[in-house]
């Protein structure tokens, strides 16, 4: 929950280090990448290219995309050798 | 308490107040007619009469930036400038206020170019009126001195910066009788330095100046707005305490012979002094005239001004700057806005005067009173915006 003006420290102070982790830039995204795991060969090329380190890898395999930080740039879609990633409008995911 | 009575100019008076305040850092760049303030102060530094770190910067932009750094690091900080210097500081004014740093500028009101000019008008500070700085205008050297001392205390109460100004040459370079308070009294009045935070406090590390986008900028500005509201209380508290300790109380404005007045002039700075002489003359002739001097322009005392002025029949607002809105000056707009909700809205006209140091004489002010009298008698305004002393 973001703080209101009455609770925030005055003068734009940031009072704890590493607060950029709390800055969820994923809400800048207009399109969302979705991995088709039937096609994915876990080559990790998307993980290498992702400029926001938003591809989660577990046990050497692609596990998921971190939508808190993925800005929807679609570089992963461009680089995937198996065309396993596709972009979908965020509108589709609105409740 | 032993006050020292001396003859000093407005600039000397402000430099003397700075010496007594003994700030941790003064960063400055010289500019006519405010040069003397820091020139005299640098003498105090050289003579070891203050503990201040003096930073001669390469421009006013740098000077105020150095002040911001020093204040963020926890120092009590002051500077001085005028006109183009304040304009060059403009960008940093908003940053100092946004970071909530209680810096005090001793300012000398000089016309902004162009055309280039070095004499008095209020276009410089009026151009900074929305920057988040408190603005206190001084009628004479004594007020410049008293206001500088109070500004430091008010600024540190609410964590907003403050500008104290005097009229170029008319006050900055004119020698007047000045009562100086004892050093220790001034220091105990201002008290221990209060800071909003301290970058050098390594036990509580903070980051300042971070990118503040759509999701937090508004909240920080809302805090600043609230601080400006709180400054209203602080101005009154400090002005009252100053009076209790030193004999002269201060508020948002001064009402000079406003009791029973039908018509009134509103003025800032030295012109208020000239107007008082005219008020005395006209009162002696039986005219019910008064002067309403605005001392604190930021924060602006809307409710208090409404209460004090709504019973007046006709008001002439003297503006020593034009807002270039095509419809008069900044003080005029604020005064009219203050009285909008009054059921007894007075007639309010605007007089632009004194641009670029054009003198205003008692006869000019008398003319304004006579015109206001006519408005009050005939219930009719001929000219909403008037220009005193300009050649047609």
Image (spheres, rainbow, N blue to C red):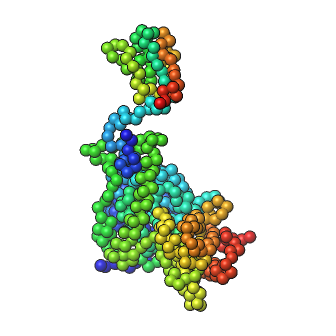
Quick check: can you spot residue B28? no
Q: Where the N terminus of chain A falls, by quadrant?
A: top left
Farthest residue, direction right: B392
Farthest residue, direction left: B203
Farthest residue, direction front: A95
| Relative horizontal placement of residue B370, taking residue B69 as reference (left or right) | right
Q: Residue B281 is drawn in which quadrant?
A: bottom right
Q: Nearer the viewer, residue B2 or B286?
A: B286
Q: Residue at x 51, y 53 (%)?
A: B90
Q: Residue at x 47, y 63 (%)?
A: B299
Q: Nearer the viewer, residue B344 or A81?
A: B344
The image shows residue B26, relative to residue B251, as above or below, that is above
Quick check: can you spot residue B167? yes
The image shows residue B53, relative to residue B167, as above or below, that is above
- Expressed as whole percent of the image width and height from the top left, the position of residue B263 reads 59, 80
- Expressed as whole percent of the image width and height from the top left, the position of residue B204 reads 28, 45
| Relative horizontal placement of residue B48, taking residue B12 as reference (left or right) | left
The image shows residue B255, relative to residue B217, as above or below, that is below
The image shows residue B7, relative to residue A53, as above or below, that is below
Count numbered badges in the picture.
0
Q: Residue at x 55, y 82 (%)?
A: B261
Q: Residue B150 is drawn in which quadrant?
A: bottom left
- Expressed as whole percent of the image width and height from the top left, the position of residue B242 reads 36, 73
- Expressed as whole percent of the image width and height from the top left, the position of residue B211 reads 44, 40
Q: Residue at x 51, y 81 (%)?
A: B258
Q: Nearer the viewer, residue B320 or A21?
A: A21
């Amino acid at each position: 929950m973001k703080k209101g003006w009455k609770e925030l420290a005055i003068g734009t102070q940031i009072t704890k280090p590493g607060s950029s982790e709390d800055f969820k830039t994923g809400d800048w995204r207009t399109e969302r990448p979705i991995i088709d795991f039937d096609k994915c060969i876990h080559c990790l090329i998307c993980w290498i290219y992702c400029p926001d380190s938003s591809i989660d890898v577990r046990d050497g395999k692609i596990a998921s995309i971190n939508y808190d930080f993925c800005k929807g740039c679609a570089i992963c879609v461009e680089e995937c050798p198996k065309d396993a990633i596709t972009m979908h409008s965020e509108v589709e995911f609105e409740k | 308490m032993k006050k020292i009575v001396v003859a000093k100019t407005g600039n000397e008076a402000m430099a003397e107040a700075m010496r007594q305040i003994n700030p941790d850092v003064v960063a400055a760049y010289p500019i006519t007619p405010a040069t003397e303030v820091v020139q005299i102060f640098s003498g105090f530094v050289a003579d070891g009469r203050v503990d201040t770190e003096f930073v001669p910067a390469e421009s006013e932009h740098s000077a105020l930036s150095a002040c911001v750094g020093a204040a963020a690091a926890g120092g009590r900080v002051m500077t001085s400038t005028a006109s183009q210097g304040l304009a060059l500081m403009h960008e940093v004014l908003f940053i100092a206020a946004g970071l909530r740093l209680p810096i005090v500028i001793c300012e000398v009101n000089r016309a902004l170019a162009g055309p280039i000019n070095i004499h008095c008008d209020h276009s410089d500070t009026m151009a900074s009126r929305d920057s988040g700085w408190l603005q206190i205008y001084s009628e004479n050297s004594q007020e410049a001195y008293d206001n500088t001392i109070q500004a430091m205390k008010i600024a540190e109460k609410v964590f907003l910066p403050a500008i104290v100004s005097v009229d170029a040459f008319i006050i900055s370079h004119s020698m007047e009788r000045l009562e100086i308070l004892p050093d220790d009294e001034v220091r105990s009045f201002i008290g221990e330095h209060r800071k909003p935070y301290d970058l050098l406090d390594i036990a509580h590390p903070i980051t300042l100046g971070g990118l503040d986008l759509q999701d937090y900028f508004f909240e920080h500005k809302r805090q600043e707005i609230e601080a400006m509201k709180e400054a209203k209380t602080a101005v009154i508290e400090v002005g009252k305490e100053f009076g209790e300790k030193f004999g002269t109380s201060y508020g948002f404005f001064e009402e000079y012979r406003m009791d029973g007045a039908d018509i009134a002039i509103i003025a800032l700075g030295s012109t208020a002094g000239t107007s008082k002489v005219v008020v005395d003359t006209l009162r002696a002739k039986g005219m019910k005239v008064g002067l309403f001097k605005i001392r604190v322009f930021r924060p602006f005392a809307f409710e208090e001004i409404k209460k004090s002025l709504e019973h007046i029949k006709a008001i002439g607002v003297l503006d020593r700057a034009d807002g270039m809105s095509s419809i008069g000056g900044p003080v005029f707009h604020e005064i009219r806005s203050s009285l909008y909700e009054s059921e007894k809205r007075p007639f309010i006209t605007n007089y632009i005067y004194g641009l670029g140091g054009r003198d205003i004489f008692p006869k000019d002010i008398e003319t304004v009173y006579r015109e206001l009298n006519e408005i009050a008698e005939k219930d009719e305004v001929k000219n909403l915006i008037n220009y005193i002393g300009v050649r047609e």
